[in-house]
Amino acid sequence: MHPASPRLVQPSSVTGGWYPWYVAGLLAMAHLVSFVDRFVLSLVMEPLKLDLGISDTELGLLQGTGFVILYVVVAVPLGRMADQVNRRNLIVIGIVLWSIATALCGLADSFGSLFLARLGVGFGEAALVPAAMSLLATYFPKEKLGRAVSLFTTGASLGKSAAMIGGGAVLALLVAQGGLTLPMVGTLQPWQGTFVFMALPGLALALIIALTLREPKRVQVADPLAKPGFGPAIAHARAHRSAYIPHVAASVAVVLLIQTIAAWSATFYVRLFDMTPSQAGLLVGSVILVAAPLGHLSGGWLTDRFARSGAPSPAAPVITIGLLGAVPAMLVFALSRDIATSVIAYGLLNFSLTLGSPASLAGVQMLTPPAMRGVVTSVFLAIVTLVGIGLGPPLVGAITDFVFADPDKLNLSLLAMVLVVASFGATMAMASRTAFGRTMRALE
């Protein structure tokens, strides 16, 4: 065994009974709330664009770059903290911070002020996933981890759905009322008031987590080389880079497509099917509510099934199936002008893309010793977030603005993105299999 891949003593007291699943459900709720606050912007992009007079490229920057800058900067330090401090408290602080930043998005009156508020949302949300993954990997054994992670990732898709359906209902109500009036603030536009309302559930959830989630005892280290910290974690990843690099590349493809499609779906229906933002939000949210959880849960089940069967990489075949399945669904979604056909294709697209999400996250846990999971997960998240969220939505906006020079060609920009990225990601996933299996065996 390579010295950077130490044997660790697993905890024996936290993997049975109902409470681990309660923890998984609570963390899934936190993931849901984080995606509500992250994606409510997608719902209000058209009225926001008209009110602030900004371009599609700037909308993409608000969706992607504005969110990821601080997220990426603080992800690794927060991941290291997740290996050393109370993970529950770290999550609670993060929820409070991103909820306040979401409310501040509602007070923005320019591209610059909204961009700054989005930086704050990214800063707070960077605390969640490394700490949550570390908790799940402690509470669940390897043969159940895929399902636990799939429940967590399902929260993300349900959050997108809640942002669209709940946010759409709030937006419609505020449009009917002519905005939202707050003491000492004045009257906000309906899109601004939507941000304020959607920030409130996070504060309630933070209190529930603080009161009911127990921080489990840390894994006992049997090898003195297996110390938590950035240096040992990077040394381990470097020693097993032939497994990590293609797996991370495939995961980037999954995240980029999920986030890009989610960022532009409501605007797609507003522009190409003449819907109002509220109508588009209800449609998109309803489809995601059905299709995406099925994709996440199926992906978790498939990942566990491949793990039990002894596949070299339980993650690679699931990611490949999802990405390749997205291609025909995207072709129909982008090119059909029949609303029923478009909605069915959109559902299949969401199912296919979300199939690979739990496999991506669970795969990183399978490749990483327990004492290093916070740091490695945070580095993984920094990479996939920087590329997937930071590049995907702005690139689609730029293609629409500068290549097609027509807002109504948004469908073609999305189609080009999916065809290229899905093919690349599937190739990388299949290339990871042999080295992935070798690394897993070294950790057993």
Image (spheres, grey):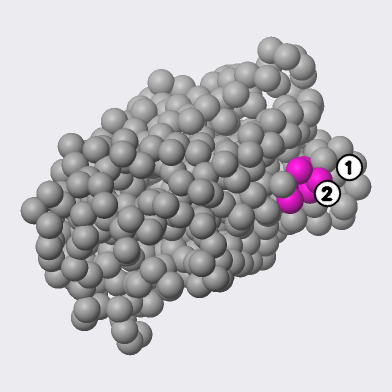
In this orientation, does residue 426 appear?
yes
- Give residue 229's position: percent from left, percent from top: 16, 43
Mark found first going from the N terminus, 1 or 2: 1
Q: Circle 1 sits on which residue? A: 336
Q: Residue at x 51, y 57 (%)?
A: 312
Q: Which mark is residue 342?
A: 2
- Give residue 108's position: percent from left, percent from top: 41, 30
Amino acid bearing label 1: Ser
Q: Secondary structure at mark 1?
A: loop
For this view, does 267 lie left or right of residue 215?
right
- Give residue 48's position: percent from left, percent from top: 56, 31
Is 29 in front, or is 225? 225
Decide: marks 1, 2 in contact (CB < 8 A)? yes
Q: Residue at x 87, y 55 (%)?
A: 340
| Residue 377, above or below 312 | above
Amino acid bearing label 2: Ser
Q: CA distance from mark 1 to mark 2?
A: 6 Å
- Quadrant holding the C terminus: bottom left
Q: Residue at x 50, y 72 (%)?
A: 308
Region of the chain picked out in magenta, as a range: 325-330
Assign the magenta stretch its main secondary structure.
helix
